[in-house]
Image (cartoon, helix red, strand yellow):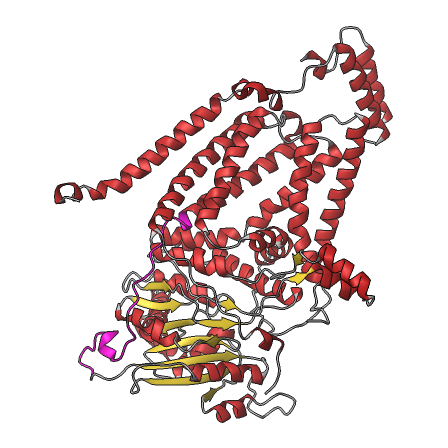
Amino acid sequence: MSPQIGKYNFLLKPLFFIFSLLFASWLVLKIEKLRPSDFGKERYLFENEPVPSVAKYDEQYLKNLFLEYKFGIINSRQLDEKLEFFLKPGNKPAVMKN
Amino acid sequence: MKQFYFHKFEDRKPYAAIPDNKYRTLLFQFTGIITITLGFAYLYWRWRYSLNPDALWFALPLVLAESLSFFSTVMIVINFWSNKDAKKAPPVHYLSEIEDLDGRKERPVKIDVFIATYNEDVELVRQSIQDAKNMKYPFTDVSIKIYVLDDGRRDGRDATKENMKIVAEEEGVEYKIREHNEGYKAGNLKNALEHTKGDLFVILDADTRVFPDFLINTTGYFRKEKVAWVQTPQWFYDTTEAQKLSTIINAKLKIENKYLSRFVNVVFGKVKLNEDIFGNDPRLFYDAILRKRNFYNAAFCCGAGSIHRREATMSLAIKDFADSLKKLETDLISKNIKSNEILDQKNILLLKQEIIPFKFHASEDIYTSIMLHADKEHKWESIQHADVECKMLSTQDLDSWIKQHQRYAAGSLDIAFKDNPIFIKGLSLGQKICYFNTIWSYFAPLWILVFLLSPIVFFFTLSLPVKTYSFDFLKYFLPFQLMNTITLTLGGWGISTKRGDQYYISSFWYMLMALFSVLKGKEVKFNVTPKGKHFAKNTQHILPHIIIISLTVLGIIYNSVLVLKGYHPCVSGFFTNFFWCIFNIISLSIMIRAAQWKPLETD
């Protein structure tokens, strides 16, 4: 290495760190923009499960409700309240509004 | 000659230190920066977007635990940042090679070797003495004196005890005792320093057996006048050997039928278990963590296997002495005491106060290191020597292992609460970070406990700490974890970390107990680590592990039923937690295996 270039050696380390930081920041920005569709045919691996029909939701919701009651997560009063809320026209659990 | 269990390991050779490589260091720094950046991005996403508002009681402790754990990662990257092995130099001959004579007459250096003992088998100490006597040195006029420092006072006064004094006399080495045990090992060393004159002194434990070149390879560093001590790696040469699974099965089931035994050999013969079952191999610590602290001049002394400059150790003692006099004077002046009385009180203190070279503390080695590094006047330097120069015995049962590690933890935490290195003047930023890193690592059980309990909480409440285990979770979490693994692999290049990782998780309970005992203000006692096999009843130690594993397995069964019946509200959450649990169970189970471990009759 010529002495002319050699005298700038002290810049190598800071430049290396700046490059590393810039690369890491670029990587984060790339990751932020990632979507399942970027994976082409394999996108199904990352997509959320397909949204089931309203009827399917109803069934699942009731199943979960009874299961929670069965395993003691909610008591009979809470079960009653939730059923009443579910059966009232126009009132649907939060999950069904998605 | 008395036979010990470790005699069969005498032929074991120590590891060779990992050669320094500047390109690997650069790659580590590159991946380290990426890991930290990705970690910040992941945690930003976790705090900002992922918390489940319906289960904040669960989401907040977990994200906090992840953040604290990430802070550890940052500290490790800083610790591993670079390597700066000290330049090796030929052994010293004359005093002028290691310090200014200041008008004194030139003479060959004097070296003392201290073997500290308390209650160890005298025949075990004899082997350490013999190995110390076998140390080579190229200059015959350099005085090398060996001292057995017996805090057990086994000089024949108590007929029920072995006689250490006779062994020392038979081996032709000096024997020193004191009539009390004040200051534990530090007090024992202080007593030795008061009665010896070596310019350099070596600290060995009762089971530390030095190699012949110990002095040749270490004294040369003292040519640099700022070097206060050199620590060599502690190599445990008696860690448990890997056993064939087939041998274990045959021994445990007492299979005598040769066909059945042969069948077991064919099926399980390739699988090996129980290598270093107690996770005693400290190579990662000495060859990576402590060695890389040379870069910050922050490698601390670990006691056995170290060599010290007397002047440095004594300078600290004198500084402490002067400080206490100054403090007394300031206190008395503030109380408007007459100058005559101040002088009297100072004289009383001068007569009463002892000069204490090593801090009287359960972790005297690290505490003294902090104080020496913080000495602004002398700016002492320390060196972590890369090559193994001695061999030692490791703990051989879980009970001893726990006591030893709890002492390390409680000692370091006690320093953190009483004399935190972050606030000590005189330490550089790098030194503060490195010492804080050591202390911080003992807080790990706080977040490890959260990581162990989180899947159980999910299994039994069916609540998620995150809104969902979605694509976003994967895209932030996986790259961070991947880069973290690559960075840590580069940092500890060539060193197996499997057992260390398992023990990091599974020792959570004992470390937590150590933390609580320090918080409660309990005095940290210096427990002498038993040298030998003591198969105490270990079941009590693994109760927390058994409880957590049982709850985890129950949770998995319950959730599997829900998934199979189609009732599970979050199947992706179940699978994520399931894999997390497998990792937890493998880590915790090592302690259970260690508690059950005994050498096979065939060994």
Q: Please name whichever residue, B411 or B11, is drawn nearer the observer in this view of the structure.
A: B11
Q: Is residue B496 above or below residue B584?
A: below
Q: Quadrant of the N terminus of chain A?
A: top left
* x 49%, y 30%: residue: B44
Q: Is residue B229 above or below residue A51?
A: below
**Image position, residue B475 (x, y; %):** 53, 28
Q: Is residue A23 found left or right of B70 in the rendered image?
A: left
Q: Is residue B280 magenta?
A: no
Q: Is residue B86 magenta?
A: yes
Q: Residue at x 45, y 61 (%)?
A: B286
Specify the quadrant that holds the C terminus of chain A. Answer: top right
User: Based on the displayed image, in which of its 4 quarters is residue A14 positioned?
Assistant: top left
> Is residue A81 shown left or right of residue B294?
right
Observer able to see residue B71: no
Image check: B561 left or right of B327? Answer: right
x and y percent of residue A93 in the render? Answer: 74, 15
Which stretch appears magenta?
B78-105
